[in-house]
Every structure is written in structure tokens, then in C-alpha cells.
Amino acid sequence: MSELLIRSKDNGQTGVFAEVSAAQAGWEFLNMAALRLFAGQTYQGSVGEHEHISLILGGKCALSVEGERFELGQRPDVFSGMPYAFYLPRRRAFEIEALSEQLEIVSCWVPTDQDHPFRIVRPEDCAVELRGGGNASRQINSVLPPGSDCHRLVCVEVYTPSGNWSSYPPHKHDEHRVDEHGNLLEADLEEIYFYKMSHPQGMAYQRVYTADGRLDELCLARNHDLVLVPEGYHPVVSGHGYHTYYANFLAGSAQSLANSDDPEHAWVKEHWDGLDSRLPLVKR
């Protein structure tokens, strides 16, 4: 099995069912965990010297932070609506209580030496973009996009219809490059893909490769699996019959998504003739 693929340890019970630390990944920034709670159960945490984003995958919760209480969440699962999320700056303690029969949350945190404001992200805050063309069409929901009031984190949700390609044409973001005017051309970013499938037996394939062949891995991703992208191009294809969802978390040299297409495949953009009519897969 590829070292870039981290299998879920989901047994249907409460607790963390998918996770990776920066030390385990062998990189500098990204840590991630997916948590399930049943009605009435609580989870307490403290972010320490990290900034933190938690994305509600499904269910409702009460979030308590610094003496305030907020009720968040509306969709039962990621294929049934737009997300709620919350951003925590460093040195904050928090508690989550499940208000629905089941609550699933995925969180990512990265080290920081900056202070930014606590923020709740609601469905109306999330821009929706339909990207690509033909069977490379997909939907992107921006949760914590570039330009957000934070230090390093970027978070988006991506929906790829059955049989479609995503993160395509293959692109990379593994070197920090600017043009002669100082405009950012490409950022050096770590990235995590956290997968969910429209059916639990669904699957997707993801290739991670570099132009010089030093890295060339093909990962079979199933429900709740993680794929790590430390460098290189990283296209995805969704198995026929199954819509694929992934939450993307990124951090690195800039709070940006600046990237470069694989020049061998960039030409396909010139032949796209419209979006897949199944999009958007989720609506407000």
C-alpha cells in the first residue's frame, strides 16, 4: 500500500476514525482528525500553538468557546447540503456537544505564531464554483479560501460526480514561484484529501506523481480514507456509480491555491464543451 494512503480505522463507533499528524506525514504543517459523536456526547480540546479549522460533515452540535455557546450544523451528511465550520485561533479551548443522533466533524490544525479572530463559517458564507468541463466537471465549496483572515490554512470541499475526473488537468503546488513583478505563480503547499463516498462501498483513484518520476503512486481511496500530497501532480477519478466528496486542507508557503498544470495535459482545457449537467451535486 502506498505510504501516501492512510486507511480509515472506522468501526462505526464513537471517537476518532481517521487521522494523521504532521510527524506521521513527514512534513511541517498539517495535522488532521475526523471525529464521530453520538447524541449527548462531548469532546473537549485545546488548540495550543496552532490555528484550527473544524468542518461539520453531518449532524448538529453545540460549540462552547470562551464562555459563549453556538449551535451549528444542518446537513445530515456531506451529500445533503452546504457546510458549517468554525475557525479557532491559537490558545483557545473548546467543547463540542452532539445535538443530533450522530455528529461527524473533520478538523485540521497547523502551527502558527499569529493571532486571528475566531470565526463561524455558515452555508451562506461558502462560495460555490463549478469548475472544469465535460467529464472533468466538479463542484468546489470554499470554506476557508485564500484571503481568509487566518495565517496558513485553506479548506475547500470538492464534489466529483460518478465517473468524472477531478483535480484535472493534473496540477501541482510544490515550489514557491513569483514573476518579475512579485505576483505569486505557484505556492509550496502540503495537502490532505479526506474522502467520503455517496455509497459506503464507493471508491476513487488518485495518482500522485512528479515529472521526474521520483514519486509515482496510485492510491485506491475508500470511504473516510486520507491521501497525502507532499509534492507533485495529483489527479483524481471517481468510480462509476459513486459520487466522490473530499475535504481538502492545505498549508505552506502562502495562504493561496496558486498552482501549475502538468504541461503534458494542460491542452485538454481547450476542448471542454460545457459542464456536467448533474452539477451542482449539493445546493444551499
Image: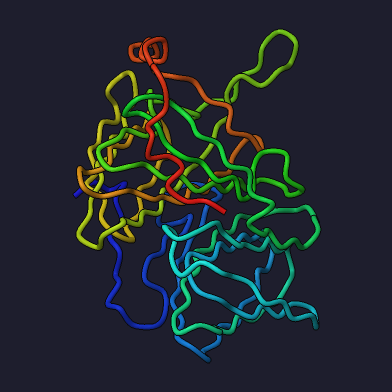
- Location of residue 217 by image quarter: top left
Q: What residue occupies the far bottom of the structure in this picture?
A: 40
Which residue is depicted at the point 42% across and 36% down?
Answer: 138
Which residue is depicted at the point 41% across and 50% down?
Answer: 246
Judging depth in this view, the residue of 85 and 5 nearest the camera is 85
Position of residue 161 in the picture relative to residue 57 (left or right):
left
Instruction: State the image coordinates of residue 190 (x, y, percent, origin top left).
Output: 50, 41
Q: Is residue 97 above or below residue 46?
A: below
Position of residue 8 in the picture relative to residue 145 (left or right):
left
- Location of residue 50 by image quarter: bottom right
Judging depth in this view, the residue of 194 and 212 nearest the camera is 194
| Tally of numbered discs | 0
Which residue is depicted at the point 55% across and 83% down?
Answer: 43
Judging depth in this view, the residue of 233 and 158 nearest the camera is 158
Position of residue 47 in the picture relative to residue 134 (left or right):
right
Instruction: State the image coordinates of residue 256 (x, y, percent, origin top left).
Output: 63, 34
- Location of residue 46 by image quarter: bottom right
Which residue is depicted at the point 60% across and 55% down?
Answer: 110
Instruction: State the image coordinates of residue 267 (x, y, percent, origin top left).
Output: 38, 10
Instruction: State the image coordinates of residue 276 (x, y, percent, origin top left).
Output: 37, 32
Position of residue 78 in the picture relative to residue 114 (left or right):
left
Of the 4 image quadrants, the one containing the C terminus is bottom right
Image colouring = rainbow
Q: Is residue 127 above or below residue 114?
A: above
Q: Is residue 219 above or below residue 79?
A: above
Q: What residue occupies the far front of the structure in this picture?
A: 277
